[in-house]
Amino acid sequence: MSVVTIVGAGVIGLSWARLFGAAGWEVRISDPRPDLPEIAAQHLAGLPVTLYGDLAAAADGAHFVQEAGPERIEIKEEMFAVLAAHTRGDVALASSSSSLLPSAIAKGNPAADRIVIGHPFNPPELMPLVEVVPGPLTSAQAVDRAVEVYRALGRMPIRLKKEIPGFVGNRLQKVFNDQATYLVQQGVIDVADLDDLVRASLGLRWATVGPFQSGVLGGGPEGMRHLLTHVASQMTFEIGEPDPAGMDSVLDDVEAAYGTGESAYERLAGLRDRRTRAVLEPLGWQRPPAADAAQEGPETGTDSDQRV
């Protein structure tokens, strides 16, 4: 049985553990948190998981490493130094980092050629995408191995040609979220209405075709060139930028629309995951191994009475 060491038992690490475990891997989780046994019992019941407080012990003998620790470069440097010293020379060391460059994580590390970003979208057990980002010193073998592992898990690994801060998914997300915040701050639209607008238009469209393919279709038989020279040529407005000083008001609106705390989080996460599972197969994505597992309690209410 292949062995994966997952570093970190937060939301992302636990989701990775469910995905690997459901796919038949032996899962080791390393995290110094004192409540690790309780967390594992709550979120990983029935899966082949072994818990470690010591990272070196968890890494010894692993066939693949997926780090999902805090998004702080000094912590990642320390963790990857341990991983480099306690894994074989052919083991890829993947980080779930959302923005830290692989070159920064690998700086001064003797295993720099094995360090690669494997950035998922949350939750990785459901979302198909994993951005595979090499650093300047990352070997082709490490990238190939990461792609092989993620593809075997039913994910869609996409290799970036080179590293860039925020990678691609989060750069696109940042631009979009900045404009959404700006529109709310300007009093153009409410928080919940903006979410509904995206779900009923761009979100639905981009789930079926990407933005460039959408541009091709938007131009009709003459394609994207026609779209750019006609409709798009009139979109000359300035888009504006959000005011950081006004974020508290936006956050108040978000909390009023969706709530806060454990109960609100569980309700929204459950609804998100049910909807995601419902659209994976019709859209042609491979069903993840964990999708058939009962990860949630019974559903309460319906989508129609819960605005998300």
Image: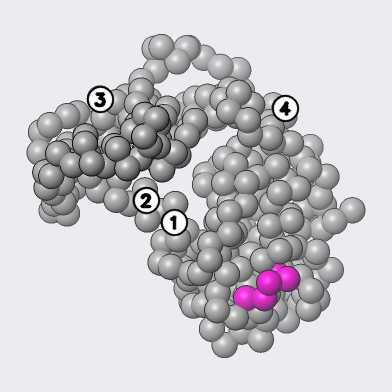
Image quadrant where residue 28 sits: bottom right
User: Which residue is under mark 3?
Assistant: 193
How far separated are the C-alphas under marks 4 and 2? Answer: 31 Å
Q: Amino acid at mark 4?
A: Asp
x, y (%) of residue 200? 35, 23
Labels 3 and 4: the sequence-earlier one:
3
Give above or below for 102 relative to 308.
Answer: below
Q: Amino acid at mark 3?
A: Asp
How far separated are the C-alphas under marks 3 and 2? Answer: 21 Å
Q: Amino acid at mark 2?
A: Leu
Tell me, for residue 230, which label it has, or none: none
Image quadrant where residue 295 sits: top right
At horizontal 79% and vertical 74% (from top left) the residue drawn is: 90
- The answer to whether the residues at label 3 and label 4 have Cβ atoms under 8 Å apart is no
At horizontal 83% and vertical 45% (from top left) the residue drawn is: 24
- The answer to whether the residues at label 3 and label 1 have Cβ atoms under 8 Å apart is no
Identify the magenta region.
138-142
Dot 2 falls on a residue whose secondary structure is: helix
x, y (%) of residue 260? 35, 35
Give above or below for 306 relative to 291.
Answer: above
- The answer to whether the residues at label 4 and label 1 have Cβ atoms under 8 Å apart is no
Dot 3 falls on a residue whose secondary structure is: helix
